[in-house]
Image (cartoon, rainbow, N blue to C red):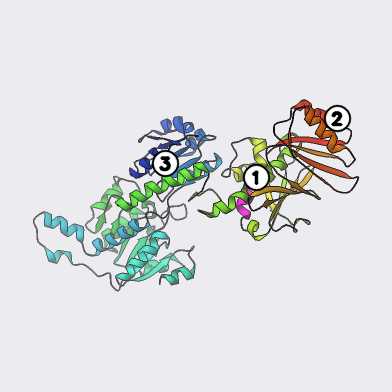
Amino acid sequence: MTFKILITDDIYTSGPELLRGETDVQVDIDQGLSAAALCERAAGYDAVITRSGTALGADFFAAAAGHLNVAARAGVGLENVDVAAATRAGVMVMNIPEVNAVAAAEMTLALMLALCRNVPQSNAMLRDGKWERLSFMGIHLDGKTLGLVGLGRVGRRVAARAHAFGMRIAAFDPYVPDDIANALHVELVEQIDDLLSQSDFVSLHCQLTDETRNILGAEQIARMKPGARLVNVARGGLVDEAALLEALKSGHIAGAALDVYQTEPPIGETSAALVRLPNVVATPHLGASTYEAQHDVSVRIVRQVLDALRGVGYHNVVNLPFADGEDYRRLAPFMKLAEKIGSLQMQLIEGKTIPAGGLQVEVDYRGEDVRQYAKPLAVALLKGLLTPALGEAVNYVNAPYLANELGLRVHQAMFPGVEEYANVLACRLVGEHEQRLIAGALLTRSQPRIVRLDDIPMDVLPEGFMLVIKSHDVPGVIGQVASLLGESGLNIAEYRLGRDKPGGTAFSFINLDSEAPEAVLAQVRGLPPMIEVKQVCL
């Protein structure tokens, strides 16, 4: 299989070179595509790699649905990617949340030093032939308080480096526990206003979301310590630029160092006025612009995309419930088991369709190996359940969304009889006219087996074409079925049978080497002991 990958923005050459060296990849680089042109080409690719220059919106993902598998952002933020629309379309969205951290942290310190020692202004004056030392009196970082808004990957690195300058570090981040802050020798504050009122330098290190947009608005800037300085190497939308402009003009804020802006380049009236102020150090979004960072971003995003397309690993995928890295290799056999249980459940429903009255999905996870993966296993179960009804467009990304649209809910339950297995996943489907319990386990930690159907213990290999037969437990059933299938040229790979009691009801699972024609199924159904006969494919 050849994977087609489209790169729509400029990324460092090491990534595209890596792709060109892969035998199962075709890569196209086409920058500056219009939104309409991008939509026209969306269905022709398995993956798209972008940076901040290309918006991947709802129209793009609607056009790409059923074809595109991965939308990758070669950077930290995802402001230009409609993650909700991608999820509806079944597209994995990934980014690189940590690889730029060192570059961004070093840029933050560079701007802080430039700001407090007037480096750009004095350099410009000296280039003009002027020697005016007294005009550029600076301040120390030593002994000052640095307030970090966000203590994630970049914020933590800034804290470590700022300690070397003798700074006291405080931080506002409601998602960081005390033990992490204590290990970094950082004082956590509960309210951002408390941070602003005590900080000599305020540095922003959070993602731009609806929650954080204008996190430094007019009210917050007014609460900053008089004479404080602001550094922003994160996202321009975190700051109300009009309020910052006024605070800088009035002297309430002594200075600002800005690498990002609400609109880039900063050609808007407010942004343009900001970068012209004498107490502002402004750079053109250089936070990640080091050779090392750009090389790492390019190579890492390409490797992530290839791993996801090949199904060998899912790293930094924001709309998947998978753990990163090696955990997926441990998880994959359980996911396969859950998917097969869900698929078998749906295929045994009359018509393989979700009934008008809806379905209730109950699950039981027994054993530590299974229980720790409850969330991704529920997603895999839903994927398996929905695929026979909705087709191959269902995947791990959109299965929860589609299930929600159809009114399906996964509930935890306790089923007696499954606790005898060390690690078992059980699912009961409850519909308007039927209900069924199917339990599965792994043989030698990799081979899925169906171990229970309702109250009947089984040992079934859920693979390929299978006949599922419910019959009266009377002598001769196996012989009659086997003879009929043999006469029809169908080879039996495995024949597994279980029963509730002698002379009661029996269930047979028959693995076939090929699909049984409908005429043969009709003959099997016509045998006297038969109650129900269905063919499934797993």
What residue is pinned by disc 2? 526
Q: Main secondary structure of the magenta part?
A: helix
The amino acid pointed to by label 1 is Glu
Q: Residues within 10 Å of mark 1 (few under 14, many from 20)?
A: many
Q: Are marks 1 and 3 in contact (CB under 8 Å)?
A: no
Residue 86 - label: none
Which badge, 1 or 2, is on the more N-terminal residue?
1
Residue 339 - label: 1
Mark 2 or mark 3, whichever is nearer to me: 2
What residue is pinned by disc 3? 49
Mark 2–mark 3 Cα distance, whole angstroms, equals 56 Å
In the foreground, 430 or 383: 383
Q: Residues within 10 Å of mark 3 (few under 14, many from 20)?
A: many
Q: Classify residue 107 by image quadrant.
A: bottom left
What x and y, as percent, mark residue 124? Answer: 15, 55
What x and y, as percent, mark residue 517? Answer: 74, 27
The amino acid pointed to by label 2 is Gly
